[in-house]
Amino acid sequence: MDEALLRTLTPTVIGILVRRGADFAAAEDAVQDALVEAVRVWPDGPPQDPKGWLVTVAWRKFLDVARADTSRRHREERVEVEPMPGPGEAVDDTLQLYFLCAHPSLTPASAVALTLRAVGGLTTRQIAQAYLVPEATMAQRISRAKRTVSGVRFNEPGDVATVLRVLYLVFNEGYSGDVDLVGEAIRLTRQLAAKTNHEEVAGLLALMLLHHARRPARTGPDGRLVPLAEQDRSRWNTRLIAEGVDVLQAALTRDRLGEFQAQAAIAALHADAQTVEETDWVQIVEWYDELVRLTDSPVARLNRAVAVGEADGPRAGLAALAELDPALPRHAAVAAYLHERDGDPVTAARLYAEAARSAPSLPERDHLTRQAARLNAQLRS
């Protein structure tokens, strides 16, 4: 297979899809899927017209995604802006599709990636960012998952843990990404909670509710990102907070702690503080210790460094941060914050600017850029 030819044709095919009506990002993602398909089938019989083949396959994949996105939006339109408390509506086919994509023949990581792409409506790029891997690596993982399940019967659903992981990532993408999937993620998690007596399902639902409760205060009128410490807590949704805390407490009484319950406990401690000064950082560090024990997640360790910096001082936070890989996403932003609190505005300004260059979203990039500009202005005055 001529890989150089594929690289040469890629911008041309993207341009054709854009002229047909696809936006650039969707066209790029569809062409990426078509290239993965080409890598799979061309060695057995390359087409006589490679460009025409790529255009046809990429356009078909774009239409498939567009139809799935339209179906998802129609489902979301049935969900109120603020999810109502209590059990979810009658289970629909969407949750069943999540379980079927989490097929036992797949590894959990592959099942999650496939479900996010096929049912969750996320692009390959968004999934790769969630997993902290290159887009090409994730494209190959999804392609392998499709090949694995292509010859199996979907009559044996996957396990709850895999479906929970998918719902968690869908919620996170909706909470901080380009597509609002929060309402859909909460709706499906409510359904799952009503269907099964699983403490981690309850933990995830509590986590979603507690985070969603703070969402109205997360951005200002001009769209700017507002950090947790600066949020107007009167805008937090106390009804959702109360429901989230009740769901979490019921789960914790079962004494089978999991990562979503631990994350929800941290969110509950933030929600319980009437002011930022009243935040119980010592207890939050203890919950992060539990979360690290359960997951050994580098992201959990990064967030723990922030909590340690609040509980024991910025020097202690920087010491915890020094144990982590500087290439970790948001590492520079955390380092900048801790250095500023430690009285080193020069280093903090440099790190804020560095963090802005690699920020995963435009609001976050703008926020970090403003932080760097603020400190640089102070240094010049």
Image: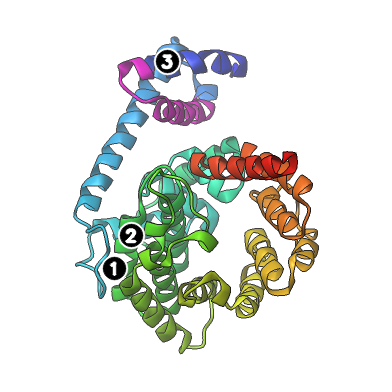
Which residue does the image show at 34% across and 77% down from the upper left? 243
Residue indicated by mark 2: 155
Which segment is the magenta one?
A: 17-41
Most common secondary structure along the magenta stretch: helix
User: How many neighbours does mark 2 have within 10 angstroms: few (below 14), some (14-19), or many (20 or more)?
Assistant: few
Q: Give the amino acid at mark 1.
A: Gln
Mark in front: 3 vs 2: 3
Depicted 86 relative to depicted 296: above or below: below
* Residue 187 pos. (x, y %): 29, 62
Q: Tell me if residue 297 comes above or below residue 26 in the rendering.
A: below
Q: Is residue 194 left or right of residue 307?
A: left
Which label sits on residue 191? 1
Specify whether residue 30 is painted magenta: yes
Q: Residue at 27% across / 64% down in the picture?
A: 83
Q: Which mark is residue 308?
A: none
Q: Quadrant of the C terminus?
A: top right
Distance, label 3 to label 1, CA atoms, is 41 Å
Residue nearest the viewer, comparing 37 with 14? 14
Give whichever of 310, 170 is nearer the camera: 310
* Observer-nearest of 151 and 1: 1
Residue lying at 28% horizontally and 68% vertically, measured from the top left = 191
